[in-house]
Amino acid sequence: MSVYYDLYETPDLTKSGEEQPLHARVVLKGSYTADEFINRVVMCQHVAHAQLVGILDAVANELKDLLLEGFSVELGEIGYFSLSLSANKKVFDSKGIRSSSISLKDINIRINRQFKKEVKNRLELERFHSPLRIENPLEREKCLRYLKKFLEQNPCINRQDYAKLVGKTKKQALQDINAFIERGILKKYGSGRSVVYIKVE
């Protein structure tokens, strides 16, 4: 069975204005819950359900205990688990920080080379046009005409409604909106999830 992928625009983080190369991302077919994963292992690997649940719980408990004791733990063929920390404030002198200022940043998983190699060797990729990426979007000026017509009948518009109005992705919609703000056509109102855009009078 193939893994689906699609190509997406790479953000111009440095704002150089140069065209950025496309990058590939997996188009997920869905996700497995813990219970669904256990049921699949039981069915495919012929392991007793209760036994597998018990083993997973035991592994998780011992993994947590060893991490809390300061160990790095290798878990079978999967890879290594370890903790990473962060300082809650900028530190330039080791004498100026206390233990209370240090906290857990993340639990790192470093995948075993052989595990990664086996996945890579068996991987079959198939191009799939994701519904989240729209090719040949409408030109911005044409979108502006739709927008002006919309704002004649409505006091404001948000990014999601604009994306639906002109048939663009959320990212493309935000690029248009920011361009319209720079041109003095729109102005932003509100903050967070309640942000809307209104016509400049």
Image: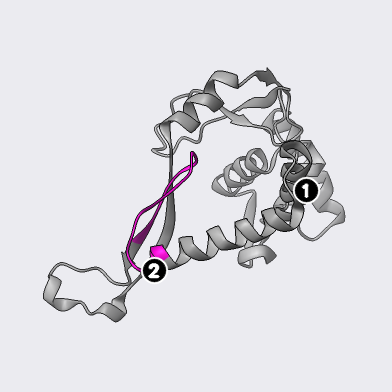
State yes or no: residue 101 in magenta: no
Amino acid type at image mark 1: Asn
Q: Residue at x 68, y 33 (%)?
A: 27
User: What secondary structure is marked by label 1?
Assistant: helix
Instruction: Identify the mark at residue 169; answer none if there is no mark.
Output: none
Q: Quadrant of the C terminus?
A: bottom right
Q: Residue at x 49, y 32 (%)?
A: 115
Q: Is residue 109 left or right of residue 138?
A: left
Inspect this view and state whether residue 199 appears.
no
Residue named by callout 1: 39
Between 151 and 18, the residue placed more toward the observer is 18
Position of residue 157 in the picture relative to residue 80 (left or right): right
Residue 76 located left or right of residue 185: left
Whether residue 69 is in magenta: the answer is yes
Is residue 4 visible in the rendered image? The answer is: yes
Task: Give residue 91's position: percent from left, percent from top.
Answer: 20, 69
Q: Position of residue 20 (x, y in %)?
A: 48, 26
* Vertical placement of residue 185 versus 19, above or below: below
Q: Position of residue 87 (x, y in %)?
A: 30, 68
- List x then y, in percent, for residue 70: 32, 64
Please state, as top left, top right, bottom left or bottom right, where the N terminus lies in the image: top right
Q: Is residue 139 above or below residue 158?
A: above
Residues drawn in magenta: 66-84
Task: Report which residue position mark 2 lands on.
Answer: 68
> Alpha-carbon neighbours of circle 1 within 10 Å: few (<14), some, or many (≥20)?
some
Task: Decide: is 104 above or below 50.
Answer: below
Disc 2 from disc 1: Cα separation: 30 Å
